[in-house]
Every structure is written in C-alpha cells, then in structure tokens.
Amino acid sequence: MRTGTHDTSQRSSALTWPVLIAALLALAVRIALVGLPLAADEGGYLHAAAQWRPGTSTYGDHFVDRPPLLMALFALADACGGTVALRVIGMLATLASILLASRIGGTPAAVTAAVMLTMASFEPFAINGELLAVPFVLASAWALLRALDATRRTGVWAAASGCAAACAFLVKQNVVDGFVLVVVLLGVVAWRGTQPERRATGRLLAAGIAGALLTVLAVLALAALAGTSPADLWDAVVVFRLDAAHSMANLPDAGADRRRVALAWTALLSAVPLVVAACLVRRPADPRQRALRITALALLTWEIVAIVAGGGYWSHYLIGLTPGVVLLVASTRPVRLLRAALAVALVAAVVQLVVVDHAPGRADDDAAVVTHLRAHARAGDTLVVAFGHPNVLRDSGLTSPYEHLWVLPTRVRDPLLSELTAVLTSPEAPDWLVVHGTSLAGLGLTHASAQRIVDRDYTLVATTGGWRILHRRDLSG
C-alpha cells in the first residue's frame, strides 16, 4: 500500500552532517548544564516518585495531578541516582526528538527541533512533561508516515503510531497531539483518496486505535500494581483539572496578565514565528506535502489552544509547539527564505544561551534553606514547605506528612487548610516548617486555624530571602 503523504527518500534517508552537528550541540548544552539545581517541579516529581507505593493519595502519600508514565520516568531517574540521571533522561529525550525530526523532514526539521529544545527562554533545561512528551509525539508522526508510505506491515506501523501517541498523553494529559495528527492526516488522505484508499486508511485508523488502547491499558495495569488505581488517576488528571480551572476562574492569578505578555514576547524573540511565516509563504505543489501541511497546521493550532487554555502562561509551555513546527517545516520545500528563517532562529537560540539565566527562580534562597535543614535536621525529621517549592523537600532529604506539595493542589483541595491543620495537630506533625512570607496568608487560603497552631507550636529559627524556617517546640512537657 502506498497512499503516502510524505517522501522521505531524499530528505531523511540518512543522517547529514548538519543534523549530527545540531544533535551534538544540543547534547553539549545539556551536558554543560547538568549541574543546575533542581527546579520546583523536578524536585516535586522526584520526591513523589521515590515514595510511589500503595498509600493514602494518588502516588504513595502525595497528590500529583500528572499521568503515570511521567511519574514512572521520574521513578526511573530516582532509582538511577536522582538529579544527574534525570538530566540524562532529558538529554536522551532531546536527542531522540532531533533524530526523529530528521527522519520526518530531513535537516531543516532536525535543526528546528534542536533550536526549539535548546531555546533558553523556553526553559527547556528543567526536565518537565512538555520536554518528555515531544519525542513520543514525533515518534507517532514518523510511524504514521511510515504506515502511509509502506507496502508491508502498514498495520504494525499504525499501531506503533497509536502507541506513541498514547505515551505522550500518559506523560502529560493535554498532549493529545498524536491523536490529532492521526485523525487529521488519515482524514485528509481518505477524503482525497479512492475508495480502496479510504478502506486502507480505515484499517490504519483501527490499528492506531488498537495500539493506543493497548498502551493505555498496559500502563494503567502497571500503575495499579504500584498502588495507583484508575479511579485515582481519573481524579488527579481529569476531576482535579476541572476543579482547578474553576478555582482559577474564581480567584484570578494577579501575575497571569504579566506572564501572558511575557510569553508572547518570548515566542516572538525566539524567531519561531518567523520560521512559521517562512513555511506559509508558498503552498506545496505536491498533494502529499499539502496533506502534511494541513495536518501540521491543525496540530500547531491545537498546541496553541492547549497553551492558552492552560491559563498558567509559563515559558516552558512553548516547548509543546515543537511537533507542530517540525511538521510544518517538513511540509515545506527548503527554499532560501526558510533557510534564512532557521538561521535567524539558530542565532536567537545561541544568543539566549549566553544571556538568559538558566537557574530556576529563587534558587539561591532555596539552597540556603536546604543548607540550614541539612545542618540542623536529625534523621527521621519531617518537613512541610508552605507552599510549593517541593525541590526543598527533595534536596533536604526529608519527608513530608502533608499530602500536597504544590500551591495549586493546596488551593484547590485544601483551601481552608483543614488538612494541614489536621496534620499539625496529629502525632505526625512535621518537625520543620518552611513558610514563604510572614504567615500562611495569601494564595486565597483561609489560614487562621492553621496559623494559630503554627504560632503556638513552632518557633522561628532562621530567615533567608522570603523564607522563614520554623522548628517544632518540645511539647512533651
């Protein structure tokens, strides 16, 4: 069968020197930055993954609103040593993305992937769901194109595409990019094809769905064995997100407008819009490339919608545009204008590597808190960070008796701090409290009861930056 939409014979039949150079440069950048301190999400995911077992919450004793494959990757990193192993996984994800892009669209697509995954203003050096999902989306695209171009084992390639699409979704729940490209590309092929070709694409769609379903079922089964049931996951990745959207609507984030404007400027200064514009100047003459162009635009549209709908407007969301831009470049003949746009984007990436601060926000303050805790905490001590920055928990080596590690789950699931109050008055009350600001106030939380207990049972022992470090008084007397 050759209902193909893409010809890889000339553009990606072999690795080229520019592709190898782009991959090595991206790898060198990640190696140079392997010693960065853990960002908040990195530390939180590592901490939660390290204690993932049957427990009282989604993952062990902590609530995390992310799918199980992401947590499995962080558990793997923890088992292999922690921070450095996590950064190695990030390197492999970057390298895989560049190589897959080269198979999809040759040198221009590979350079595009390398630029977007090393653009410092996109904050790609913290290993997060967006970065880890990109190679799965690109693998889904490559496998689907192979299925359409192949004469044998087309169903196997389609099933592999569905499997990779499901893996991306199981890393980050709003990354349904693989499903979008499967539906759109096969839909365009069927619409423009003959009756036999429509039947063939129907079989490919069925194989892709089967591959996706089997993958989801397998991951759900493995998560259940680790102690996380399908009901737990539904609550975390679906119900919680709906509750969070409602909470954010009722309690607007004061910094959202500022971050929205900053995100727009970040995208513009990356020169990625220039690459997109260069791709759209000419309409592909080849009908197969036109089908890929339609698919790329649909995918890019979804990725933009996902960024806007997220409401957070964090810079690392822009990494999620990588598959759409790569496919758009792959659908474009590499004319002089596109090469010039890619050159500008490459220069922008290099400049940003020099001028952008790669360290996570408040890294110095976090490090000072960790240093104090390591010097004074005893074996078996526990800690609650109020609120967020679970990297402090991970780096200090302490455990937390409180279910929530991030600000948003606290605000959505414990807005009255009743759960925290119960912890503070229980035998499992933490030995240490780290509070940002002068009290538990802020973030829309009703804190009076919890604050009275903190004032009664804890004493201030140190301050650093905006953090106050408190230690539990000896209440035995």
Image (cartoon, rainbow, N blue to C red):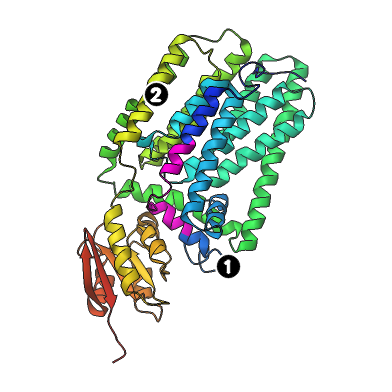
Q: Position of residue 393 (x, y in %)?
A: 39, 63
How packed mark 1 is, by other alpha carbons closer than 10 Å (few <14, some 14-19, many 20 or more), is some
Q: Quadrant of the N terminus?
A: top right
Q: Residue furthest bottom?
A: 477
In the foreground, 253 or 336: 336
Residue with the mark numbered 2: 345
Say the numbered circle drawn on residue 54. 1
Give the quarter of the image for residue 103: top right
Q: Amino acid at mark 2?
A: Ala
- Work out whether residue 409 can be spotted: yes
Above or below, 117 against 390 in this view is above
* Range covered by the magenta-colored residues: 27-46
Q: Is residue 235 above or below residue 117?
A: below
Tell me, yes or no, whether the highlighted magenta stretch contains residue 5: no
Observer-nearest of 248 and 475: 475
Q: Secondary structure at mark 1?
A: loop
- Can residue 416 be seen here? no
Residue 221 pos. (x, y %): 67, 56
Left or right: where does residue 445 sit relative to residue 225? left
